[in-house]
Image (cartoon, rainbow, N blue to C red):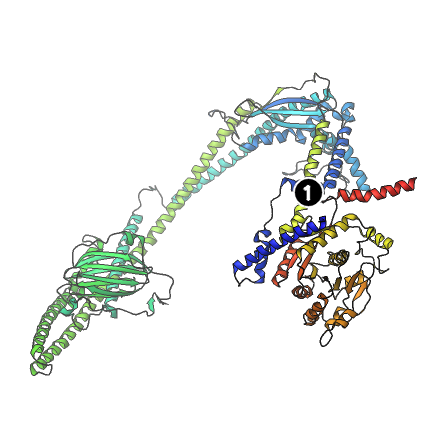
Amino acid sequence: QSGEEIQEETMSRINDALKKEGGELIRQAGSGVDDAQRLELVYGAEGSEERQMTLRDHWRIMRNHARLIISTAVVVTLLVTVWTMLSPDYYEGSARVEIDLETADPLPSEPETRVAALDPAYFATQLQIIRSPMVLEQVVKALDLPHDPIYKRYVGTGGRKIRQLLRLAFLAKKDPLIEGEPEEPPLATALDPAISHEDLKRSKDLEPFVRDLQRRLTVEPVKEPSSAIKDTRLVSIVVRHPSPMLAAKLANAIADALVHSSKERRLQAGKTTNAYLTHRIDDLQSEIREAERSLGKYASKHNILSLDPTQNTAIDRLTALNRQLVEAENARKEAEAGYREALAPKAEAPSAPMSAEANAPVAATPVEVRPAVRIHSGGKSVNRMESSEIPLVRRIRVAPNGEATRITIDLEDSVQYTSNRLANPNRVFFDLQAARLTPEVAHGNVHVDGGLVSGVRVGQNGADVVRVVLDVNEVKDYTASLANNPPQLLIDLYGNSTPMAIAENSGRKNAEGPVAGTAQGKANSDQMPVLTAASALAEQNAKQMADLESKLADLRQKRAQLLVGATENWPEVQEVDQQIASLENSFGQMRTHATSVVLTNLETKYRQELAHESSIRTALDLQRSVTQVQNQDAVEYRLLQQQIETQKNLLNGYLKRFGGNDVAQVAMASNIRVVDYATLPTHGEADGPWRLVYVVLAFLVSVSLSICLALFLEYWDDTFRSSDEVKQVTRLPVLAVIPAVANRKGQRLLRDTGLQLNDKLTSPALLLNPRVSPIVVENYRRLRTAVRSMMPETCKVLLVASSLMGEGKTTTTANLGISLSQLHSPVLLIDGDMHRQQLSQVFGVGPFSGLQELLATPGELDEKKVFSVLQKHEATGVYILPAGRREHCAAELLGSTHLRSLLRILRSRFSYILIDSPAVTACVDTMILSKVADYLLLVVKGGESSREVVRHTQEALVNVGAELLGVVLNNIKVMSYSYKYDYYIASEAEPKAKSAAVGAR
């Protein structure tokens, strides 16, 4: 077998394996797989993940940008080399000074203190002072550098000359020279002291020397590498100058100037401090004398002899009244709560006493078991069933009271509740709907002090239900009611007595009420005579109701015994019923009378507490006015005294500071001293510049920056540069990589070979001729082999498409068709791009009838009419079906049934049918053509096609059911990205060399 046949057989086996694997994946996913999921099933979901960069990839990127890297490195290295060669040699003069912490001015009675001991900015500030123009100007004046011929020779004036040249071209601002200023300086102010014109002019003349000295000066702290503490208080002053003697002299002069400047600064600060202290002492003495006179006048006017801050009877009396008012308010609130509770309809007793049948396993529902109605609280209507704010159960209290026991449940707001009773064990439980417990109630124990309750248990039953379980003893009846202000659930348990017999206790205080002996207890004891008559009447009514209740119980028992042997119509039974009705009527009247008595008792108690509270409040207001008047004078007097004491303390501090400042100026010493002076260098070699080091560093830095720039450009590039990138994004095989061919060269080849069918055409589409580069020819042969291997014999229609215009699909269609025709197989090229008709223009087919006319033909298509519009290209043997010259709507024509009929006719005559289509993103023609084509070949242009656009194009084609055969990577540079064709280039160069040698002979 030939090499081409072996290659075709190998690629055919690979293609069959891929198809089998893809089909198996789709079958495993079931019949419900849509077209959008086929891309992941066939080509793999991992195709969208980016591959990590390897060392080989970095090397490839540097090779591709080798021109950028080399040019940058060469230019930067040359510039640094020229700069270092033009720089003169210099010598270093180094001096060292010690900068100690500044000491505050010591007072006679205080030890010397250090200032800024922990301030990290202090040492950095001293380093900046050494480089300041003030210190350097003193050095310039002391050494008379403007008249030193050696120093003037090296003073840098290039900056001013460059600015002068730029100013001529209007590219630089004018120098900040003083122009048109008056000869005499302006008047001095506090912020702008007067400076003579001579001083300003002298400073301007010395400015170039100061700037030059700043440029040559290096100031840095000295480190100790061998010690654990690296920082020291030594500072190195280094001056670089071409003259070794002048370098040492400048370094020593700067060190001396720094010491002198420190002393002058401290002396000037001491003089300024003395002047300020003198002025402030005089002012304070005058203010103290005036304040003492004012204090004496105020004391005489308000009759103030002495003021002891520990004695104030007015405030004590005000405090006592305030405490009594709080107690009176509490007593009034309790009386008001009892009175309002008695007035509420919820507090009414049941219409009839509970019978003995109440001890059954399921007791009667309490007085108020309300459904989910609207509950009014604080004047605002709240629907508890729809509210998102669940009220809290704050506290549970148990208060025994003789024959009854009250359980008070303090709530945050009104709630809905239900109750029930169990006979064995004897328990009463309440369910509070839409409520929750506070942590104190949930984890605490309720104190029970005897009475009818032996234990109280509480728990959260569900998300918003609180259950209160009462373990009771000998409870005959119980009632429950809701109080609104404050929100409370009041549960009353009754023993052998009836509820009305103890109704008078409902308004009294619970177990937390005032204890005897307190102020409130005395107030209640004073009110007892007023309530005695009502209490006696209530007790008498209670006894009568108890007798009636006993009689009712006997009559009901007698009635039950009679009903055992008789009916309800029996005379004796009817007589008993009349007696029961009469007693019940009397019982109701007595209950109404008892309720009236209790209300009168509670109302009287409430009004007495209210009057008591009002009297205390009036006395409190009167005492508050008296106390305010007395305190106002005392406060003003104390303020005057404190002001005088403050001024005296401040005066004593200033006097002490003034005396110590004079002593400190005499004993003042500088905190800066010179440790080492600079000396002349003993060796004859210069200290710099380090030319070789600078050149090497410039080379390394330039190479590093250029490599980083190349990596950034590669990362920013979203186009395809190699077949590996295409496989990574599309998960499709790359059938061929077509190298880039220059347009001018391609046009020249067409003209030389005579293959340019249209003189006005300049597109280098037909490059497969004897004089075209073997690299291009071989790659199209490789594409031909791949297409023949991967397409079954029954599949003949291949659609060539691309994402955007100008990616080379028309060129690929033409050259692939020519390459297939070289195997002596009939090949047909169909120009499916009805908008641009590029394929027709490449082969020079004029505006003849073509695809549009065939698809627009009414009725059935016949072979005679189809083959009449085909055009044969004699030079290549390829048949062309032009797009046509009639203007029709391309989408409707391609979607008609004539297209399938046309392809069915053409399949019988041609081995391969290649269709050139428009760009996928431009119109829907390619989507329609992909449904009738057997396979689709996607063309990607290297260096221009965006990865994101190609990915979207692939997804769109898969969604419509297109069978993607592979990808053709077009327009790739021959020598880039590891695409080397040395063999073909050498074979191409040999004939040229021989022809050149023959010409030379």
Percent coordinates x, y for residue 562 in the rendering = 7, 77
Q: Residue at x 74, y 38 (%)?
A: 70
Q: Is residue 987 visible?
A: yes
Badge 1 crowding class, 10 Å Cα cut-off, few under 14, some 14 to 19, many 20 or more, is some
Give the left or right position of residue 872, taking residue 325 as reference: right
Which image quadrant: the C terminus?
Answer: top right
Percent coordinates x, y for residue 350 in the rendering = 19, 71
Percent coordinates x, y for residue 281 in the rendering = 51, 33
In depth, the one of 280 and 407 nearer the eye is 407
Give the left or right position of residue 891, taking residue 310 as reference: right
In depth, the one of 154 and 592 nearer the eye is 154
For mark 1, what is the residue?
61
Percent coordinates x, y for residue 640 in the rendering = 42, 42
Could you tell me the amino acid type at mark 1? Ile
Q: Is residue 740 visible?
A: no
Question: Is 636 drawn above or below residue 389 in the view shown?
Answer: above
Q: Callout 1: helix, strand or loop?
A: helix
The part of the image, by quadrant, that contains residue 638 is top left
Question: Is 986 drawn above or below residue 605 in the view shown?
Answer: above
Question: Is 947 drawn above or below residue 928 in the view shown?
Answer: above
